[in-house]
Amino acid sequence: MEATGEMPHATDPGPREQNSMNRHLRVSLVALLMAVVLGAGLYAFSSQRNAGSASFRTAQIKRGDLQITISATGTVQPEELVDVGAQVAGKILSFGQDDSGRIIDYGSSVEVGTVLARIDHELYAADVAQAEAQLAQARAGLQRSEADLAQLQARLDQAARDWSRARKLGPSEALSQSAYDAAQSAHEVAQANLAVGRAVVVQSRSGVAQAEAALRKARQNLEYCTIRSPVKGVIIDRRVNIGQTVVASLNAPSLFLIAKDLGKLQVWVAVNEADIGSIHPGQRVVFTVDAFPEEHFEGRVGKIRLNATLTQNVVSYIVEVNADNQSGRLLPYLTANTRFIVEEHHDVLMVPNAALRWTPKTTDRMTEDGGGGTADPAARTALPGQDSMHLPAPATLWIQEDGQVRPIQVRRGASDGLWSQVTGEEIREGMEVVVGERINDERAGASPTVNPFAPQNPWRQRTPTRSGTGPPR
């Protein structure tokens, strides 16, 4: 018999099997939902536990001295330098000796008149001899002119007597007219010759003076061949060697540099234009040098040079700081790290600046009277004639109480960049104030933070760790 309908396939599910599959699907979805809720709860519990393990970093309010300073870099310089040069040209033959008998060199102590060096003097000695000969010749010429003048004076006297007799006789039979005229002419010529003789004497005397001046010049040049110290001091620099030829032209060549007194030094400090208004003569300065980093030196501002320098659009002024160096520790041209004392506050309460900047990130860890730590900018407004930078400004400090923080209102004063002066009714020396917040690390028992995206070492042995008082994980 031929079948009229298709038989159901053996693998097709029936109504009972379909209901069973739907039931299993619902159970799986419920289980997945419960797992998600449980995971979220565990995450929230873990976050709450980690938040509860947070602690605060604190610092104490201390009492001490606070200095407001301006830092700058300068160079140690001798207070007075003398540059000794050569006024004549020639070859350096030798150097002199100092008081201890050592050859003049760097660091030699010299007195006024100490011989520093000698230049070849042969040419200048010849010039002296020539000038002396010229002087002797000029003096001989003067003596001759004076003798000639005496002879001319005698001739004038004879002509005067002849002319006197001729005038008494007059032109007559006893004296002819020609004889009379000859006597008159002889007298006039004798007078003129005497005037010439006197002029020659003046000229000879001038020649003698000129020869004497030439001799003094030649002797002075000969003296310049021996270079002497003009002051008492210390040789800072020697710029020539034996055998070197110096040439003195328009500018005298520099041979030695002498510091007049190394017991008094100066520090030339380049101060920025933004800070120069806080610098004044007599201001106290503290500085150190790299040669003695643990030793502090003191000085006073001497003067501020007005010839400012411009370097890469930065204007700076040179400030001269006078420093005592009787100990001899400071050497010329050392680099000095200077601090100009602008303000000094003694025996004041101070806190780290970090304590004034810190504020809680969440409000659930503050007490009810908590608030922000930001000062009101309007409170910094200065009255006419006051400096707003030095007015006490309102600020907030935070102290820890029972796991929470509480604000304390204070007035903030001067600051040196690390510490600030504070005043207030509630603060006292030794009080702990919050400067930051930290989370307990592995050394305190907390679980380390693991980045799930970082590559893991498959060979690392996993050991159980503890978090707080909970069970091992």
Image: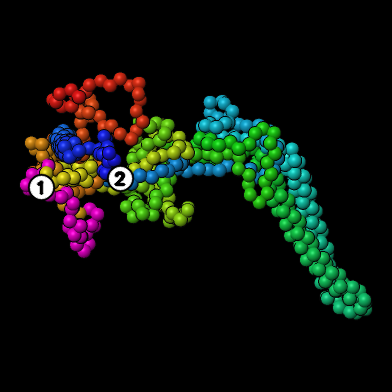
Judged left or right of residue 455, residue 394 is left
The foreground one among 246 and 68 is: 68
Marks 1 and 2: CB-CB under 8 Å? no
* Residue at the spot of label 2: 69
Q: Nearer the viewer, residue 360 or 234?
A: 360
Percent position (x, y) of residue 7? Answer: 26, 39
Disc 2 element: strand
| Three-letter code for the amino acid on which mark 2 is drawn | Thr
Q: How crowded is mark 2: few (under 14 residues within 10 Å), some or many (20 or more)?
A: some
The reply to whether residue 235 is visible in this rendering is: yes
Q: Name the residue under label 1.
A: 370
Compare marks 1 and 2 and give the one earlier in the sequence. Answer: 2
Query: Is residue 369 a member of the stretch shown in magenta?
Result: yes
Q: Can residue 222 be seen in this view?
A: no
For the C terminus, the quadrant is: top left
Residue 216 screen position, x and y as percent = 68, 47
Front tag of 1 and 2: 1
**3D distance between C-alphas at marks 1 and 2:** 35 Å
Task: Name the main secondary structure of what is drawn in magenta.
Answer: loop
The residue drawn where x is 44% and y is 38% is 335
The quadrant holding residue 453 is top left
Q: Which of 290 and 326 is in front in this view?
A: 290
Could you say where residue 59 lies in the image, as x and y percent from the top left? 18, 36
At a point 8% along the width and 38% down the height, the residue shown is: 401
Q: Is residue 469 magenta?
A: no
Element type where label 1 sits in the image: loop
Task: Sort mark 1 into few (<14), some (14-19) or many (20+) by Cα contacts within 10 Å.
Answer: some
Q: What stretch is highlighted in magenta?
A: 365-390
